[in-house]
Image: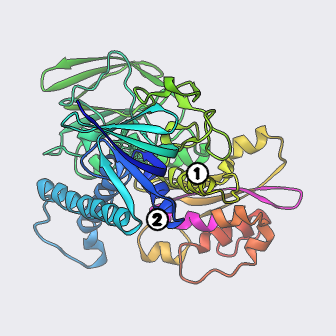
Amino acid sequence: MAETKQGPFDVVVIGSGPGGYVAAIRAGQLGLRAAIVEKDDKLGGTCLWRGCIPTKVLLHNAYLYEQILDSKKLGIEVEGVKLNFPQLMKSKDDILRRQGNGVAYLMKKNKVQVFTGYGKIRKPGLVEVAGADKAVTLLETRAVIIATGSEAKAFPGMEPDGKGIITNIEALTLDAVPKSMVIIGGGAVGIEFASIYRSFGSEVAVVEMLPQILPLEDEEVSKELEKILKKRGIKIHTGSKTEAIKAAKGGYEVKLGGASSETLTAEKVLVAVGRKPNVENLGLENTKVKVEKGFIQVGVDMQTAEPGIFAIGDVVPTPLLAHVASAEGILAADRIKGLETHPINYNRIPNVTYCDPQVASVGLTEKKAREKGHDLKIGKFPFAPVGKARIEHEEDGFVKIIADSKYGEILGVHILHAKAGEMIPEAVAILNGEMTAEALSHTIHPHPTLSEAIMEAAHAIYGQPIHM
Ligand SMILES: Cc1cc2nc3c(=O)[nH]c(=O)nc-3n(C[C@H](O)[C@H](O)[C@H](O)COP(=O)(O)OP(=O)(O)OC[C@H]3O[C@@H](n4cnc5c(N)ncnc54)[C@H](O)[C@@H]3O)c2cc1C
């Protein structure tokens, strides 16, 4: 097969998720000759097509559906409320298509050349792209950014079959609401799907090996979320291992071990046990790039052990989040341009799980702060007395602020509330500005807003919350 050459480029990005496409845009903005290689027929990656965006569309629609079902108490009576699941999925697809078109437009706007095909490093400075027709295009380049992302992990005995044992991909494209679903994995992905399908009427059970769901979140927040999800009718088995999955009449049997020895039955089994970075078949053996425990190793400037080859996003051992991938993409492009860059502070990355209610956090959990030897002052304030929470009938949850007792420096902020995700950026700014709890307590928050609970939690650190 004939090979054609293109370039030279300043940078070739492999993978067009929120890491890759953002890196390409920044490279274009900086005047670098940039190309992006994507094996799928559309740009946007896991986040746009199989992750962040589609799950949030379903979560939003699930939230609205529940609000409408519950609206009678507000004096709004809606008759004949009905879930049209195919139409709901179609509305999701429309949003994805428009987002995808947006990414394609941004490539054009920033003069980034798009190559559709499988990208592989033939040697440093040379990327080969194999198209669907097997034609190979060679891209000569000064730098490469690997942004190939990740895919769902599978354990032996629970390999997805795409029909009954599924991953996020199939869970986002079902043609009907399953009667029942067992979700293996109580991390952010598992809990978001539990929330979605419970709202749509499925019987849902979550199995988590560790003692708490959302294992990375503050223990108190996870425990309270667990209580609320149980009230919503979701069964939760923490400290429980999935021993075996076998086909049964109408679905599957899932045998548990550990804290629970139940055998669960369900029409669908969703496996959400983590992600596996896409580092295979990228030609890394032709470079000095190092892979450890499945992740590409990089320095603070996102450069690998091979000068000129960078890696960002889910393929590197930093939090597997879209906004982290994007920040790393900007950093790598700036570095390739030769700009002065600042390392990312991974202790100040916001985390949001968009279940109902949402969990959002930044900084240290109480347990982590104590392990680090901090003497703590903790302020907590519930949403129930907050006027805006009452107005919106969203009274579940609380804000928890963790501060060092010496100067009151805020080390972590944890929020459980239906709209927690919209409140956490304030906390990121608080941590970035190394603000004290006292300064926060004197920061005037508008009334009535949900954010008043953040100010109240700061007052609570000094034992003086106003509305409690
Ligand atoms: C269900 C789910 C929900 C999520 N929700 C959120 C959320 O709400 N917020 C959040 O921050 N994060 C969320 N995430 C995580 C987020 O999706 C990832 O962290 C993010 O997509 C990583 O971006 P990336 O650019 O590294 O890789 P990806 O988005 O995975 O993109 C990688 C791209 O590279 C392409 N590719 C791979 N190999 C090659 C190759 N050899 N040649 C050419 N192209 C290649 C792939 O086709 C893909 O398009 C979610 C994940 C899942 C699964």
Residue at the image position 30 percent from the left and 53 percent from the top = 54
- Amino acid carrying label 1: it is Ala
Quarter holding the C terminus?
Answer: bottom right
Give how far across and how far down residue 449 sits, in percent.
53, 78
First in residue order: circle 1 vs circle 2: 1
Assess whether residue 122 is covered by the magenta stretch.
Answer: no
- Give neighbour class at mark 2: few <14, some 14-19, many 20+ (Cα, 10 Å): some
Is 426 included in the stretch rendered in magenta? yes
In this orientation, which residue lies closer to the viewer: 268 or 281? 281
Q: How far apart are marks 1 and 2 (CA)?
A: 32 Å
**Res. 460 image quadrant:** bottom right
Disc 1: CA contacts within 10 A as few (<14), some (14-19) or many (>=20): many
Q: Which residues fall within the magenta stretch?
A: 403-427
Q: Which residue is denoted by mark 1 in the rendering?
A: 332
**Residue 419 circle label:** 2
Q: Residue at x 29, y 41 (%)?
A: 117
Residue 433, percent across and down?
74, 66
Q: Residue 433 carries which label?
A: none
Classify residue 278 as left or right of residue 75.
right
Quarter of the picture holding the N terminus: top left
**Does the image show residue 276?**
no
In the rendered image, residue 332, in percent from the top left (x then y), is placed at 58, 51
